[in-house]
Amino acid sequence: MDQTNTLPVSPAAEPSHDQIQALLDELKPCPDGNLIGLLQQLQDHFGYLPAPALVQISRRTRIPLSRIYGVVSFYAQFYTSPRGRHTIRCCRGTACYVRGGRMVINAIRKNLGIDDGQTTEDMMFTFETVACLGACALSPVVMVDSTYIGKATPRRIDSVLKSIKAEGSISQERQ
């Protein structure tokens, strides 16, 4: 599915002008500074890159807003909309696909009620499929936040998601 067609994520509130100003005062952006580093810090703080913050960066650094958006849209690490507390990444590469990855992707879609590139309404999960997670020997592979789940099955993924919903975090004993 095209990732530009995502569901709106209602519970997240956009940061206020004052919150953005305070963070930028702390970070001290400048025209000769590291734009990518600044964007990373901003995203680490807010969880995504709010449009008003990008406008303020443009004003403070005198970097054209179009150039900032060019950087943000080029790098897959940057997000311009709120994301869930947990990110579920499922590999759709060849090794994972031939070993049942499509069934795992469908199980995640069904369990969470969202599609690739979407976030649950409660802001708990964001689901993404990726070309490769670099663990082909463990295929099919799913990454929940920073935890890899190898030899994933629909049943195992349903169990992991159920655990996260109940506990708020991935149980390490399932790895």
Image (cartoon, rainbow, N blue to C red):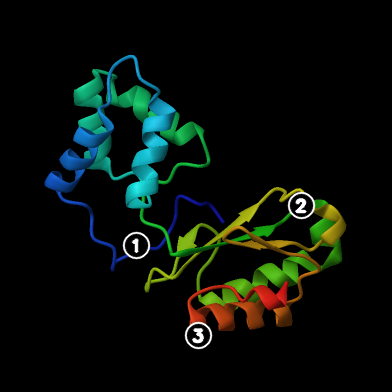
Q: Amino acid at mark 1?
A: Pro
Q: Residues within 10 Å of mark 2 (few under 14, many from 20)?
A: many
Q: Nearer the viewer, mark 2 or mark 3?
A: 3
Circles 1, 3 touching at the beta carbon (< 8 Å): no
Mark linked to residue 121: none
- In the picture of the structure, the residue carrying the numbered disc 3 is 166
Camera-nearest residue between 83 and 92: 83
- In the picture of the structure, the residue carrying the numbered disc 2 is 93
Taking the image as drawn, is residue 80 in sight? no
**Can you tell which quarter of the image residue 72 is in?**
top left
Mark 1 → mark 3, Cα distance in angstroms: 24 Å
User: Which residue corresponds to the image point at 51% horizontal and 76% vertical from the top-left?
Assistant: 113
Residue 10 position, x and y percent, is: 29, 66
Q: Is residue 39 above or below residue 95?
A: above
Q: Amino acid at mark 2?
A: Gly
Residue 85 position, x and y percent, is: 44, 64
Mark linked to residue 8: 1
Q: Amino acid at mark 3?
A: Ala
Residue 143 position, x and y percent, is: 65, 61
The C terminus sits in image quarter: bottom right
Q: Nearer the viewer, mark 1 or mark 3?
A: 3
